[in-house]
Each structure stands twice: as C-alpha cells, then as structure tokens.
Image (cartoon, rainbow, N blue to C red):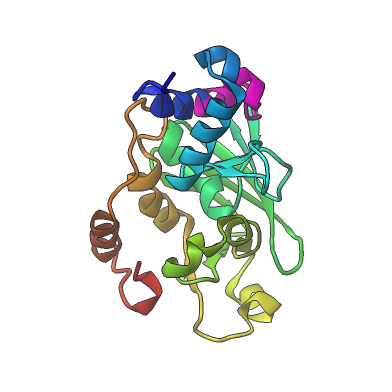
Amino acid sequence: MPIPEDVPKRVRKFVFDHFLEHAAPPIVEQVMTAFSLSREQATDVLHSLEAARHVALVKGTARILMAFPFSAGATPFRVTVRGRRYFANCAWDAIAFHAMLRNDIRVESFCHHCAAPINLEMREGSAVHVDPEDVLVYLALPAARWWDDIITTCSNTMVFFASPEHREASALCASPGSGVSLTPDQVHTLSVPLYGKKMDLDYARPSKQSLLDHFATMGLTGDFWKL
C-alpha cells in the first residue's frame, strides 16, 4: 500500500512536537505505530525528510540525530525555554529557538576558543542579556558549503566566541577572511525565515531566492552568502 501523500509532513510535525515535549526525537518504531507504517515505509519517510533538509539521521540508520534546531545528543549549546531544557546543534540553532518558539529563551554555552561560559537571554526578538558583552557567533564555512556535510557544519563550524580576540586566537579562524561574525540579534533576524514557522504542519523551507533576498536585506552579500 502506498504511503498517503500527507504522511511526510505529518511525520515531520510529529518529530518536532516530540522533540519539543521530550527534548529527544521519536524512534522509528514510534513513527511506525503513530502512522500505521511498515518499518520500510517509516524509514523511507525519515530519509525523505532528511533529503528535504528537515532532519539529519545517524549515518546508515533511520535514527534522528538532528531536527534543526533540536539535537538528539549533548552539545555545547544548551537552551532553556519555559522551564524545559534542550540541546541545540550549533550557536545559530541555539538562538533560532527564539525565532521558532517565540518565547523567551536562555542560552548557556562556551567560548569555542577558551571554554569560558557564555550566557544569552533572548526576548521579543532581541538579546536582553549577553555575557560576556562581546560575544559573537562565528560561521566558518560559506553558505554554499553548509549542506555538504550538515552534521560537521553544525558540530564544528557554527560556534560562539567570547570576543573578537578569542575568535582571532582560534585555529578555526586559521584562514583570515574565510568566515563571518554576527551578533546574537543578527542571528535571530537571520533565523526568522528558516525557523519562524517550523512548528506549523505545513512548514516548507524557504526558496533559495527568498533566502538570498533575506540575506541582502540584512546587508549580507558577497561570495560568503551565495547559495
């Protein structure tokens, strides 16, 4: 029996709702049960969601590792929302929780260079508390390379630094001018088109052109931002 046309979007919503409720992804057996699917069908749906860039799976399995911005594993990016704690995949995803849920959030992380604690609070679209005050989000890879290996991109190249000086001292910035630095407020604005409606059943990723237009409205142009 073929999979009903609306099942992939319903499974995507199920994954995000499960993460929101439990701070962990559903397993394939839960997808099978919830949607009356065979193991092969459930696995196919999860792989289709990965192909559509909604989730990332543990390689060679149907186990969900990431449902952006949620992480199934412990990371240096802890987010607290309405008393619940989650792990984000990267510095960008940590701030994107605010765009996705439209609730106050607290981010607890570390400087990628020295491991100094970093604390942020986001409210009504802005950072209302930033400690240290010079915290920045560093994106080491140009946009066209983010999806070459999204697990590596999130895990290793989208990080917090306590200050520009710590950024410059880091081996991640060995190639001058190769990355970009953004403030928490800029990252929130950057997040809105991609994350603002993630919890909606009919969420669809923005088109390439709409993202480029959004980057341009923020003044983010040049080779780094080409998709």
Would residue 83 be visible to someone looking at this image? no
How many numbered marks appear? 0
User: Going by the picture, which residue comes out furthest to the front?
Assistant: 1
**Residue at (58%, 85%) from the top-left corner?**
175
Q: Is residue 142 above or below residue 43?
A: below
Q: Position of residue 195 (x, y in %)?
A: 40, 42
Q: Which one is nearer the viewer's eye here, 162 or 180? A: 180
Image quadrant holding the C terminus, namely: bottom left
Q: Quadrant of residue 9?
A: top left
Q: Quadrant of residue 30?
A: top right
Q: Which one is nearer the viewer's eye here, 182 or 64? A: 64
Q: Quadrant of residue 187?
A: bottom left
Q: Which one is nearer the viewer's eye here, 112 or 74? A: 74
Q: Position of residue 200 (x, y in %)?
A: 36, 27
**Residue at (30%, 48%) from the top-left corner?**
206
Is residue 162 within the magenta segment?
A: no
Q: Position of residue 98 (x, y in %)?
A: 46, 39
Would residue 46 be visible to someone looking at this image? yes
Image quadrant holding the N terminus, namely: top left
Q: In the figure, is residue 191 to the left or right of 128? A: left
Q: Position of residue 166 (x, y in %)?
A: 66, 74
Q: In the figure, is residue 137 to the left or right of 115? A: left
Magenta span: predominant SS is helix
Q: Which one is nearer the viewer's eye here, 71 or 52? A: 52
**Residue at (34%, 25%) from the top-left corner?**
5
Q: Which residues are the magenta region?
A: 15-31
